[in-house]
Amino acid sequence: MSMNIDKQSIQKILSSLTFYVNKYGLFLFIILSLGFASYMILTIQTLLIAEPSESMVMEKSKLNQATKIDESAVKKIKELKSANIEVRSLFENSRDNPFQE
């Protein structure tokens, strides 16, 4: 099976191809653009719906550690809060009406 490829046969094929591209180019462009937009929308939709696996959730949960509050610091803050009555009342008045002098 041998094919003769010469300059005239290539020009004939290219001329028929350019005819179809000129005639149906806009239609092909619109179809390809709609196909690409549909692909992007479906891909985004798939990524939005995707849920993480249990192993990923457990791995990230291990990284989150609860903060530990020092009990002596809590006691000290409570002591300071109860000891300074004037300052506390000054702050409470300022919270109620900040424009009052």
Image (cartoon, rainbow, N blue to C red):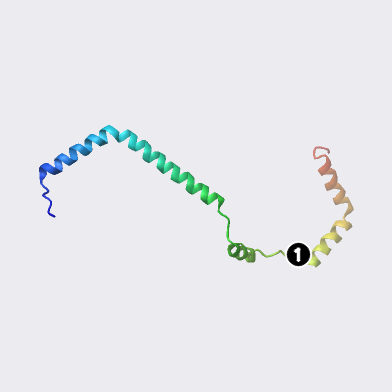
Q: Nearer the viewer, residue 101 or 2?
A: 2
- Residue 36 in the image: above or below residue 26: below
Give coordinates of residue 17: x percent, y percent: 22, 39
Give coordinates of residue 95: x percent, y percent: 81, 44
Tell me which corner region of the image, top left, top right, bottom left or bottom right, holds residue 21: top left
Q: Secondary structure at mark 1?
A: loop
Image quarter of the N terminus:
bottom left
Give coordinates of residue 90: x percent, y percent: 85, 47
Question: Residue at position x 80%, y 66% from top?
Answer: 71
Residue situated furthest top in the rendering: 23
Left or right of 21, for residue 13: left
Question: Residue at position x 80%, y 40% from top?
Answer: 98
Give coordinates of residue 100: x percent, y percent: 83, 38
Q: How many numbered marks, from 0 up?
A: 1
Question: Residue at position x 10%, y 46% from top?
Answer: 6
Left or right of 56, for residue 13: left
How many residues crowd mark 1 within 10 Å: few (<14), some (14–19), many (20+)? few
Left or right of 93, for residue 67: left
Q: Nearer the viewer, residue 60 or 21?
A: 21
Tell me which corner region of the image, top left, top right, bottom left or bottom right, holds residue 97: top right
Q: Amino acid at mark 1?
A: Ile
Image quarter of the C terminus:
top right
Left or right of 62, for residue 3: left
Determine which residue is flagged by label 1: 69
Q: Nearer the viewer, residue 66 or 55?
A: 55
